């Protein structure tokens, strides 16, 4: 599916999150993973201006509703456990994970995997 703008990305996130509440987001830097999470937040009535990539903090919790995780810097499954990520995954209905790793520790059929490919300017391709 081709997405032509950040607003279209948000609209698509609205549609997807109504069917699946747990999302795995793959894509290169700048592909639009955090933009997708902003669309999820908007659907959940969370101020999307609060949404930032949790690259250095590993996870952000928004209004006790949405868990946003970035696994880019995790090196081992033990890192996930030490940082409390696995425990938090169990607590939340609405979850978006950027750069998912070690899926065998938390993956079940509830997660939908989405690849976001940057095509040009604001144009993206979503594959799921």
Image: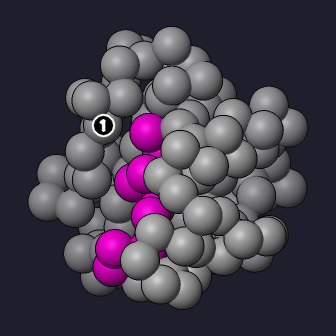
Foreground of the two, 75 or 24? 24
Splitting the image into 4 quarters, where does residue 99 fall?
Answer: bottom left
Q: Position of residue 103 (x, y in %)?
A: 61, 70
38 lies above or below 65 = below
Horizontal relation, residue 84 to residue 77: left or right: left
Asked whether 72 or 51 is in front, the reply is 51
The residue beneath circle 1 is 51
Q: Is residue 30 magenta?
A: yes
Q: Residue at x 29, y 67 (%)?
A: 79
Residue 43 % position (x, y): 60, 23
Highlighted range, magenta: 29-38
Is residue 37 in view from this perspective? Answer: yes
* In the depicted structure, whether residue 18 falls above or below residue 22: above
Residue at x 25% of width, y 29% of height: 50
At x 66% / y 76%, what residue is drawn? Answer: 125
Q: Is residue 87 magenta?
A: no
């Amino acid at each position: 599916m081709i997405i032509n703008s950040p607003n279209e990305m948000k609209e698509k996130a609205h549609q997807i999150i109504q069917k699946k509440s747990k999302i795995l987001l793959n894509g290169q830097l700048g592909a639009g993973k955090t933009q997708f999470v902003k669309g999820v937040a908007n659907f959940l009535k969370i101020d999307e201006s609060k949404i930032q990539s949790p690259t250095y903090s590993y996870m952000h919790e928004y209004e006790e509703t949405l868990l946003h995780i970035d696994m880019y810097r995790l090196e081992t499954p033990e890192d996930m456990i030490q940082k409390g990520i696995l425990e938090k995954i169990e607590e939340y209905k609405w979850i978006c994970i950027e750069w998912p790793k070690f899926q065998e520790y938390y993956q079940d059929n509830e997660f939908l995997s989405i690849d976001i490919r940057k095509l040009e300017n604001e144009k993206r391709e979503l594959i799921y």
